[in-house]
Amino acid sequence: MLNISFIILIWKDIYLLEHCLQYLSSQTFKDFDIIIIDNGSHDDAIIKLPFQWSNLDISIKYFSTNLGFATANNIGANLAKGKWIALLNADAFPEPDWLEKLIQAAEQNPEYVTFSSRQVQYNQPKKLDGAGDAYHVSGLAWRNAFNLPADKNGLEQKETFSACAAAALYSREAFLRVGGFDEDYFSYFEDVDLGFRLRLLGEKCLYVPEAVVYHVGSASTGKRSDFSVYYGYRNMIWTFFKNMPTPLFWLFLPLHIISVIFFIFYFSLRGQGKAILKSVFDAIRGLPKVFQKRKMVQNSIKIKPRELLRVMSTGLFEPYIEFIRRNTQ
């Protein structure tokens, strides 16, 4: 059995995928195969990739439409042969020892099932794109150290709430055991939701600063687009309602509601009122199905609420300070 199976999605911008494959061909750890999910790219050039990169073990699964990030990655995970699955966005370019460092971390820390990369902004390499995901008790989440100086931040290996799926390593067994990504999410926040569900089973995520990847970010959907606002905040609401353990759910529900109201006003003032209102409306409309899933999630919890709080962000104003900081830089 191969150690690692990469899963890479392509929807458009095949030139990014070709750039990504160039970086993968330089990896010092060689025991991996690559599963490319063609998410309705309709680009004939993708057929040539296994021949152009004959030094890589590439297989391609074609779909005529965009299935979404969640569904496509789940298909890839079920096709994977490796003990570990490495999720990598086509616009994420790893340093040569990226995979080697992740594997070393996995071997040295067997109590962890997910490993998060040190993401550096491709277009501004002096700034971080993220150092693992933070999750706040209000339901908001963000990438640690985003937009902060790369030479001073994210330098310590430590536990983090979840991994950004743009560049992460997962135990395939653990990924499949919780059902992979929630396919109703389509895109955005699915990695936080997955990390949350793994947490509830007692599984942990380790941030590995030595594993460096350069990330363009939002290359397909666009930063601050209506698409990202809609799916990001709809799925944020679903994640809170589905996963938050009952004692914490009722304790922090007022904070969650305040957060939703805050962002309704914020995005409305920014001219994206239609996107955020549709997001909240569809989130509420989808709650009956979310509560059905909640029963399954809550019945499988293996940790105490205090254990979950230990890895959550709890500062009352922390998410708003973080949001303002990254949107004013």
Image (tube, rainbow, N blue to C red):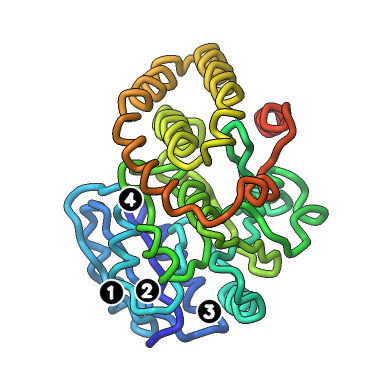
**Few, some or many residues within 10 Å of mark 2 (<14, 14–19, 20+):** many
The amino acid at mark 1 is Ser
For the C terminus, which image quadrant?
Answer: top right
**Residue at disc 2, secondary structure:** strand
Are dots 2 and 1 in contact, CB under 8 Å? yes
Compare marks 2 and 1 and give the one earlier in the sequence: 2
What is the tally of numbered marks visible in this picture?
4
Residue marked by disc 1: 59
Q: Nearer the viewer, residue 89 or 3?
A: 3
Residue marked by disc 2: 34
Residue 51 location (% of width, % of height): 28, 79
**Residue at disc 4, secondary structure:** loop
Residue 8 location (% of width, % of height): 38, 63
- Which residue is at a point 57% across and 54% down the rendered structure image? 303
Q: Nearer the viewer, residue 52 or 173?
A: 173
The amino acid at mark 4 is Lys
Q: Given this view, does label 2 or label 4 mark the residue nearer the observer?
A: 2
Left or right of 40, for residue 162: right
The amino acid at mark 3 is Ser
Residue marked by disc 4: 12
Compare marks 3 and 1 and give the one earlier in the sequence: 3
- Which residue is at a point 50% across and 31% down the rendered structure image? 224
Q: Given this view, does label 3 or label 1 mark the residue nearer the observer?
A: 1
Q: Given this view, does label 4 or label 1 mark the residue nearer the observer?
A: 1
Are dots 2 and 4 in contact, CB under 8 Å? no
Residue marked by disc 3: 26
Residue 65 location (% of width, % of height): 20, 48
- The CA span between labels 3 and 1 is 18 Å
- The CA span between labels 2 and 1 is 6 Å
The amino acid at mark 2 is Ile
**Residue at disc 3, secondary structure:** loop
- The CA span between labels 4 and 1 is 18 Å
